[in-house]
Image: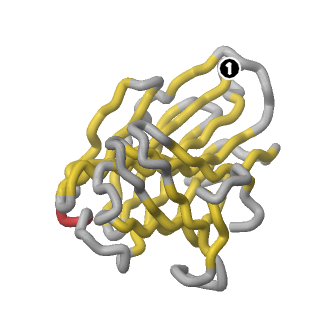
Amino acid sequence: MQEFITTSTTLLTIVNDWVFQGKNSCKVTTNAVINDEQAVYKILFPQGKRFGLECYVSNSLTLGANREISLTIYGPSKTTGTRSIGKIIFKITAIGAATLQTDVNGVRTTIATINDYAADSAAFFHYIKFVFDLYENKFIRLYFDDLVYDLGGVPGFAQVITSRECGFIMRLKTMTAAVATSYIDNVVLTADEP
């Protein structure tokens, strides 16, 4: 987790008291403000076509149930010359109420309702992996715990920008004026996904 760039605040901290595996995780805490968001991200110049971003996330829902955890992959599209952006959201609206969504420039589509996965316990670490094709700007697959979703090549957002870097972002956003806390661990970036 220390290899990822984080904003230098007390809201993003490397901790060793709650981890999925290894020695450290990143504790992400929002302010008690509607739409406050905190992000952990990595920027590089990798080679490849289809990229994956995977991690384990743990939530303390008693500290503000209404939250979104999003994974974003962006980078240059070789076919259009623009920047391809793919974003997946794990949205928890209440204890026992959650959905998985795609987000294309603010337009959201629900992939699945996963209410059974939004228990009131920080003891659960959820596995999330998102695969996105930068070259062709399309969603490929989403893994969530024991669930797998074929995203059917739905187009991502094409941003008119020519910078060449790739970015991988994990973001926590609160939907109410309450503090939200999540832990991110075991982050893996993959290239040349099938």
Residue at image coords 50%, 67%:
183
Viewer-side residue, 54 vs 174: 174
Residue at image coords 45%, 61%:
181
Q: Is residue 119 above or below residue 79?
A: below
The residue identified by callout 1 is 82
Residue 90, position as x, y percentages in the image: 36, 51
Tally of numbered discs = 1
Viewer-side residue, 13 vs 141: 13
Locate the N terminus and report the quarter of the image it occupies.
Answer: bottom right
Kind of residue at badge 1: Thr
Residue 97, position as x, y percentages in the image: 19, 54
Number of residues whose C-alpha sits closer than 10 Å to that of mark 1, classed few (under 14), some (14–19) or many (20 or more): many
Q: Is residue 171 left or right of residue 192?
A: left
Q: Is residue 187 above or below residue 170?
A: below
Q: Is residue 150 visible?
A: no
Residue 72 image-quadrant placement: top right
Q: Is residue 25 left or right of residue 141?
A: right
Colour convention:
secondary structure
Dot 1 lies on which element? loop
Viewer-side residue, 146 vs 56: 56
Residue 41, position as x, y percentages in the image: 67, 50
Q: Is residue 133 left or right of residue 103?
A: right
Q: Is residue 3 above or below residue 24?
A: above
Residue at image coords 60%, 73%:
25
Q: Is residue 161 visible?
A: yes
Q: Is residue 71 above or below residue 105?
A: below
Residue 170, position as x, y percentages in the image: 56, 51
